[in-house]
Amino acid sequence: MGYPPRRSREPLEEKPGVYCIRSLALAEEGRKLIEWAEAHMPVLMELRRRYSASKPFAGYRIAGCLHVTKETAVLIRTFVAAGAEVAWSGCNPLSTNDAVAAALAAEGIRIFAWHGNGEDFYWCIERTLDFEPHLALDDGADLITTIHERYPELATRMLGGTEETTTGVNRLRARARQGRLVFPVIAVNDAETKWDFDNVYGTGQSTIDGILRATSVMLAGKVFVVAGYGHCGSGVARRARGMGARVVVTEVRPIAALKAVLEGYEVMPMDEAARIGDIFCTATGMRDVIRRHHFELMKDGAILCNTGHYDVEINLPELEELTLRKRDIRPNCTEYTLRNGKRLYLLAEGRLVNLAAAEGHPSEVMDMSFANQFLAHLHLVEAAKRGERFPAAILPIPPEQDELVARMKLESLGIRIDELTPEQLRYRDDYLAGT
């Protein structure tokens, strides 16, 4: 059959079966970025130190589909140091840092990723499967879905996989409910040391970073509408309020809405928020959160962005239908002039603004998320070495792993905590102790 051609014919640097990137000339810039991240990810670097001699991943191949950032490169290097063979693609068309991809390619990593690879997004994923991996590391479930739908024989041989984000876990749980999940997947997203930190503090800071880079507007005094008050949305709301914005939350879940109310935010339907918002940020994982009649209600000059995994939360086809003309005002900021004369500004094509218009989450918080990824794959490999096979289900992170990651992070910060005394341990387990 030969090496399949790309759909796009844009000039790229390509070595069939090995890499396809923007340009190897960017490698030195990428190496500097990776070194910066390594200096700010002590937990992952400690895991690299612990396992570089024993190489528990020797003989195992990992396919990864995750944003190609400097932090991801630290994870990849750690897997390689521990003996793994790795092939990688980006999990979003606009989230690849071309310099980081070049640095990885120069180090011999199989990588198929470049910024703006929309036409070839799935082509890149499939190239990581050409070397028949044992494990899959996913962010958004596109890799694991591709394996199940297009490579069923490979799926039956896989040891398992991991999923990084809420959207992907939801997709895979839906697959599992229908009895169509073939191999076990560990829900890294659901670890406390992932979603209570990465999703909240990482998404909050990096989303505001992306908005500011794309617009340079002042947030203080603006009406900032956050759609969705889960871990990610709550993080965005906190950071926007910290910048002086008046934050409005929209929700469909009563409990989440009540939390937002008790934390001091205004809560209202999107139909009402659309009339008063200056900046809108979706963080729901659901499609069509902002749609035609909302666009028509918005102020002239309203800014729209999304920090969810897929570009479906803002209904772009309906926005296009209402548009008289559009133009790029600045990088990652497109002005839409509607037929009613109002101008709306869409950031990063409606894709996740924190990665498309900024650099993604800070290294310090990804340190814990990626430590969980490394340890989850180690968990799968160690089981395979014992001859064990986990059920084809969505599996939680072992609680002791969460504790380990948190403890390692605290140690890296020079922070000590108390321990229960033997008497306290006995009291904790004494079910007869009462008033």
Image: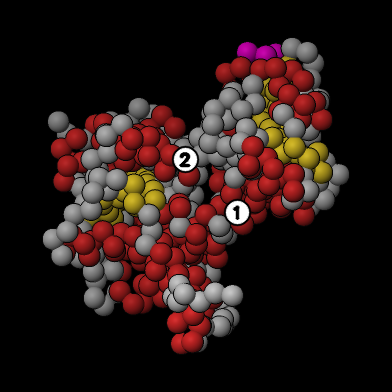
In this rendering, would 42 be left or right of 318? left
Which residue is label 1 attached to? Answer: 200
Instruction: Name the residue at 49% across, 87% down.
Output: 423
Q: Is residue 268 left or right of residue 37?
A: right
Instruction: Answer few, some or many: residues within 10 Å of disc 2's Cα (few below 14, many 20 plus, some between 14 and 19).
Output: some
Q: Residues within 10 Å of mark 1 (few under 14, many from 20)?
A: many
Check residue 89 for magenta coloring: no
SS class of the residue under badge 1? helix
Which range of residues does the magenta coloring cover? 320-324
Q: Quadrant of the C terminus?
A: bottom right
Which numbered marker is on residue 167? Answer: 2
Tell me if 259 is positioned left or right of 404 in this view.
right
Rendered-image quadrant of the N terminus: top left
- Residue at image position (23%, 53%) is 390
State the separation of the CA atoms marked 2 and 1: 15 Å
Q: Is residue 153 left or right of residue 237?
A: left
